[in-house]
Image (cartoon, rainbow, N blue to C red):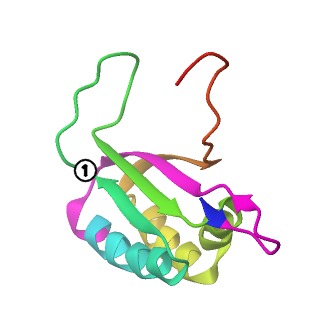
Amino acid sequence: MADGAEGTAVANGYWIGHVDVLDPDPYLDYAKLAKVAVEKYGGVYLVRAGDAERVEGTWRERPVLIEFESYQQALDCYHSPDYQAAKRVRSEAGAAAVDLLIVEGSDNRLPGMR
């Protein structure tokens, strides 16, 4: 968690993506542009494809998890002209089917949990 203006903790923000790559060449173009936008907003890729085992429910082939210093930075990155240009490249080429959720992190635990 990052520190806020008055020393208060600010929860990290995350992009949780589920991706099916439909056309690898334009997807690679999108990925390069998206990476520039993500890094510009301080994002760090924690998961980007790799081995995964679906143990419940439905899932797309490629998981993506990106961490930002705050929920607001995660939102700002998504709505930025840089990321929207990358998204346009992906969408216009039909390069991938994507589900994306932007969430605020938490260090809170359920009562009674360590």
- Out of 48 and 61, give the one closest to the viewer: 48
Task: Count the labels in the image.
Answer: 1
In the drawing, does residue 8 fall left or right of residue 92?
right
Point out residue 102 in the picture as x, y percentages from the top left corner. 61, 51
Task: Determine the residue positioned at 70% across, 60% down.
Answer: 10
- List x then y, in percent, for residue 66: 44, 58
Magenta residues span 3-26
Query: In the picture provided, is 37 more to the left or to the right than 46?
Result: right
Q: Name the residue carrying label 1.
A: 49
| Residue 65 lies in the magenta stretch | no
Residue sitting farthest toward the left: 51
Q: Is residue 110 above or below residue 24?
A: above
* Residue 104 left/right relative to 55: right
Tell me the amino acid under the disc marked 1: Ala
Residue at left 19%, top 47%? 50
Relative depth, front residue between 88 and 8: 8
Disc 1: CA contacts within 10 A as few (<14), some (14-19) or many (>=20): few
Decide: is 48 above or below 40: above
Relative side of 65 to 102, left or right: left
- Kindly state the secondary structure of the residue where label 1 is placed: loop
Q: Relative to 26, does residue 54 appear above or below in the rendering? A: above
Above or below, 108 relative to 88: above
Q: Decide which of 112, 2 is in the foreground and name it.
A: 112
Question: Where residue 81 appears, x then y in whole percent?
Answer: 62, 82
In the rendered view of the protein, which quadrant contains the N terminus? bottom right
Tell me which corner region of the image, top left, top right, bottom left or bottom right, holds residue 113: top right
| Residue 12 is covered by the magenta coloring | yes
What residue is at 22 percent from the left and 35 percent from the top? 52
**What x and y, as percent, mark residue 91?**
47, 62
Residue 45 picture quarter: bottom left
